[in-house]
Image (cartoon, rainbow, N blue to C red):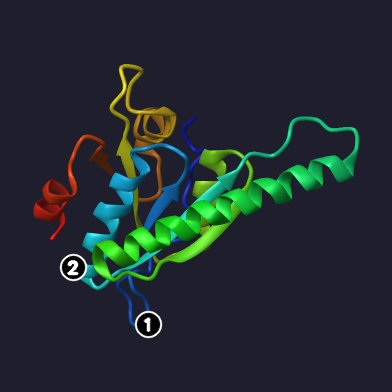
Amino acid sequence: MPGDHALSGKRRSYETGHRPKFLVIIDKTPECARAIHFASRRVARTGATMIMLAIVDPPDNFEWIGVGEAMIEEARAEAQKRLDAAARDARSAAGVEPQQVIRVGDRAGAITALINEDEDISFLVLAAGTSKEGPGPLVSTLAGKASSTFPVPIVIVPGSLSDEEIDALAG
């Protein structure tokens, strides 16, 4: 896996005309709200910006192209609803207006591609799940073996933290 997440260019977050961005992955997990709250508070506190990414899984092999396209469009519509709700949460938590992005593809690849495209992304904010199965597949994948080659720092918010606890930590 080393090299899979190679950075194509340097970060420019703090150069003139640029501002750091906190990237939050928006998905169906309950802990996603913890990442949104933390990132919103940090963005407001530091004067940064936020970008929210929802990733749509491509359909498995479909012989009929129209069916696959319809499935992707339906998944995009659902992803947009999640992004809209997440943006409302960010506004409510800290008055933050996030940029919204939807990508189709595998999760790690879509995240890395967006980071490589946007040189202002400075942090990836994830929240760890609280179930017995572990912190969740995204945290396990990105913060595990790939973390040594990942292009930006990964902030992992414990999924069990309350809004008040996050506020005390994030500002």
Mark 1: few, some, or many residues within 10 Å (few <14, many ≥20)? few
Which residue type does callout 2 highlight? Arg
The reply to whether residue 154 is visible in this rendering is no
Residue visible at 52% across and 56% down?
A: 114
Quarter of the rendering containing residue 85: bottom left
Q: Position of residue 69 (x, y in %)?
A: 80, 47
Q: Compared to 97, does 141 lie above or below? A: above
Q: Position of residue 54 (x, y in %)?
A: 52, 50
User: Residue 45's mark?
Assistant: 2
Report whether 84 appears left or right of 106.
left
Q: Compared to 136, does 40 lie above or below? A: below
The reply to whether residue 109 is visible in this rendering is yes
Report whether 170 appears left or right of 147.
left
As drawn, the residue found furthest toward the right would be 64
Question: Between marks 1 and 2, how big is the CA–CA gap?
Answer: 19 Å
Which residue type does callout 1 highlight? Gly
Identify the element where label 2 is drawn: helix
Q: Which residue is mark 1?
A: 17
Identify the element where label 1 is drawn: loop
Residue visible at 42% across and 30% down?
A: 141
Q: Position of residue 115 (x, y in %)?
A: 47, 55
Report whether 87 appears left or right of 79.
left
Q: Position of residue 55 (x, y in %)?
A: 56, 46
Q: Compared to 70, does 86 lie above or below? A: below
Instruction: Give 86 or 119, whichever is nearer the viewer.
Output: 86
Residue visible at 48% across and 46% down?
A: 6
Residue visible at 32% across and 31% down?
A: 129
